[in-house]
Image: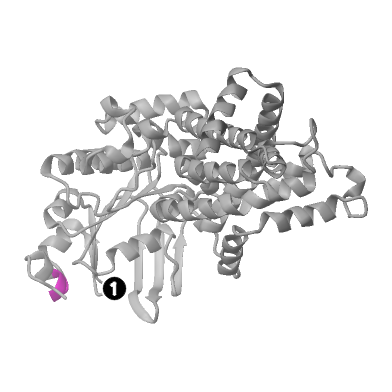
Amino acid sequence: MVGPSVELREVCVTRRGKAILGPITLTLGGSGFTIVLGPNGAGKTTLLKVLHGVERVSSGTVAWSSGDAAARQEQAYVFQRPIMLRRSVRQNLAYPLQLLGMPKAEIAGKVVDWAARIGLEEMLDRPAPRLSGGEKQKLALGRALIRAPRVLFLDEPCANLDGRSTREIEAVLQAAHAGGTRIVMTTHDLGQARRLATDVVFVLNGRLHEQGGAPGVFEGPQTAEAAAFFQGDIVE
Amino acid sequence: MNEIWAGMLEAFRLIVTLDGDLVEITLRSLQVSLSALVIACGVALPLGTWLAIRRFRYRRAAIATLNALMGLPPVVVGLIVYLLLSRSGPFGVLGLLFTPTAMIIAQVVIITPLIASITHQAMRELWAEYHDLLISLNTSSRQRVVTLIWDGRRALLTGALAGFGRAIGEVGAIMIVGGNIDHATRVLTTAIALETGKGDFALALGLGFVLIALALIVNFAIHTLSRTEREGTW
């Protein structure tokens, strides 16, 4: 299944006169697992929010092949710090489906199914805000995927998580990718990028420095900054 | 001290004997204040939440006005409602003056800004927490308001109880628009004012204790029904 593609042309984001991102010109195809790499403050999150349409661009254009309005409907976003509704795990999973007006019986079935997929089937009636960090992130991921989005954005979903939680989340992501979900994810964990990426976008100081298939970018980066970053050097 | 003791005894006697007048004015107090509370919540909860999530040109002025209206003098509200409902007023034809409905209207005007302001404060914090998620899920304004009201219902309960407290204890406005007519518009607060004026402090104090007990019972009942203590840490 091929999802919608997106094209950014000369996109800039400025806040209070300070350039946060851009100008960036970038095209992302309709399938794949794109990892957006870069050091802290490089503009990865801003780029992700621009793609998702929740960050207003100061100049330039963002064009989804399916149209901007339709694109938002078929996207989901997982934040670095998972946002839990003050409800149970069950109600958190049900929420996106309730927004769509899905019948209750259908929602109940999907919730149980997804709780099992993310390993929270024993915690369905537990208050979501009381879950551990890893459990919250898995719940946020399940809540994003339960709507079967064609495009999934993830902002450092495994930051501050232990190895086991990271592995479980990566397994869910790989299953979603295998199921046809187009994934765009930021991370500064190179190991994770090598495990998951089919293609890589490297940003630094709000600018695009490198883009291409994962093996090519990792083995033969075209810019000195990307090469230094991949070698573990500090880049700024 | 003797009068307080006598008042407690009088309250005890009134309650134990289920005094007919006491039951009547207590039920009327509850009817008027709970009706006002329901109507005020119907307006104030969506309004306070809407003010928390919407950005518009005069938003700050609107919030400042709302906060200022919390201090509306009940007597002035009573006077304005009186003028509006009096025979020569624009709504005189409705014949509502000196009826429980007029008292409800006055109480709605008094407590709506209070509940809306508390709602706005509570919803502003919840909106800051939920903002990114609800925007990302492409929710409509209505869906955001409903979600915030539902998830913030325990905080909103505090606002509603504050509104109820102000309504059940209010005397100035309802005295003006209700007229404190026996078997028609007399409620606990206006009865207390009347008995105090007559010098029957024991009965006034007795009614006062009943009023306090009533407020406590309603607060406790709402907290229990909404299970705030059990799930309050969500």
In the rendered image, residue A225 lying in the magenta stretch gets the answer yes
Q: In the image, what residue occupies the spot 43% across and 51% down? A: B126
Q: Which residue is mark 1?
A: A206
Of residues A74 and B168, the one drawn nearer to the viewer in this rendering: B168
Disc 1 marks which amino acid? Gly
Of residues A54 and B28, the one drawn nearer to the viewer in this rendering: B28
- Segment tinted magenta in the rendering: A222-226
Of residues A117 and B165, the one drawn nearer to the viewer in this rendering: B165
Residue A126, compared with residue B109, is above or below; it is above
Given the image, what chain letter belongs to the residue carrying mark 1? A
Residue A115 spot, x, y in % from top left: 31, 30
The image quadrant that residue B229 belongs to is top left
- The secondary structure making up most of the magenta span is helix
Asked whether, in this view, residue B163 is left or right of residue A112, the answer is right
Of residues B87 and A115, the one drawn nearer to the viewer in this rendering: B87
Quadrant of the drawing holding the N terminus of chain A: top left
Under tag 1, what secondary structure? Answer: loop
Label 1, residues with CA under 10 Å away: few <14, some 14-19, many ≥20:
many
Quadrant of the drawing holding the C terminus of chain A: bottom left
In the rendered image, residue A9 lying in the magenta stretch gets the answer no
**Residue A93 shows in the view:** no
**Residue A230 shows in the view:** yes
Residue A98 spot, x, y in % from top left: 49, 36
Residue B194, compared with residue A26, is above or below; it is above
